[in-house]
Image (tube, rainbow, N blue to C red):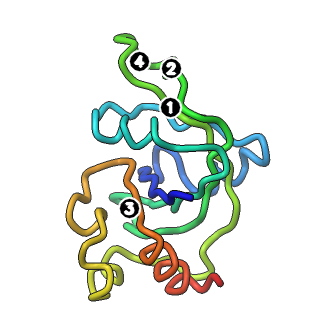
Amino acid sequence: MAYWLFKSEPATWSWAQQVAAGAEGTFWNGVRNHLAKQQLMAMRVGERGFFYHSNEGKAVVGVVEVIRPYYPDHTDETGRFGMVDVRAVEPMRVPVTLEAIKAEAALKDMVLVNNSRLSVQPVSDAEWALVRAMGGLP
């Protein structure tokens, strides 16, 4: 199983809004970067990802699950980009800040540390386990 990180500005789409979407979840649209598009295309139903608040907070605040694979993004007039649907799974007990991630030597190669502008990112198995532990999740 692959793991991911989804970035969202809380003023645009917050963890609270994701949780409020319930079990039906919601689409993850608006991605306009070709590398991020490739990440979305690689996602499979049941895979999990971190929900990351960017700009404000700069922290992993929850875990989401992919519930619908890649399909066309209705907000893309060019027809080149797509989206997946995700639902909230669980909140981090303690938000894991970007500062804490950068301070952890074992996370020095994490995409978030080296390419923080990418809105959808892969997360390795080891990174997944460590960030979950940092956030108080088993």
Query: Which residue is label 1 attached to?
Result: 83
What secondary structure is found at the residue carrying circle 1?
strand
Q: Residues within 10 Å of mark 1 (few under 14, many from 20)?
A: many
CA–CA distance between discs 2 and 3? 29 Å
Q: Is residue 113 depicted above or below 52 in this figure?
A: below
Give 135 or 82, whichever is nearer the viewer: 82
Marks 1 and 4, how far apart at CA: 10 Å
**Horizontal and vertical percent position of residue 7:** 42, 53
Q: Residue at x 77, y 40 (%)?
A: 24
> Mark 3 or mark 4: which is in front?
4
- Do residues under tags 4 and 2 come within 8 Å of each other at their CB atoms? yes
3D distance between C-alphas at marks 2 and 1: 6 Å
- Closer to the camera: disc 4 or disc 2? 2
Amino acid carrying label 2: it is Pro
The residue beneath circle 3 is 56
Q: Residue at x 42, y 75 (%)?
A: 127
Tell me where residue 63 appears, x and y as whole percent: 60, 63
- The reply to whether the C-beta atoms of the residues labelled 2 and 1 are less than 8 Å apart is yes
Amino acid found under the numbered disc labelled 4: Asp
The answer to the question of whether label 1 and label 3 lie on touching residues, with beta carbons closer than 8 A, is no
Residue 14: x, y in percent? 54, 52
Lower sequence index among marks 2 and 1: 2
On the image, numbered disc 2 is attached to which residue?
A: 72
Kind of residue at disc 1:
Met
Compute the Cα span from label 4 to label 2: 8 Å
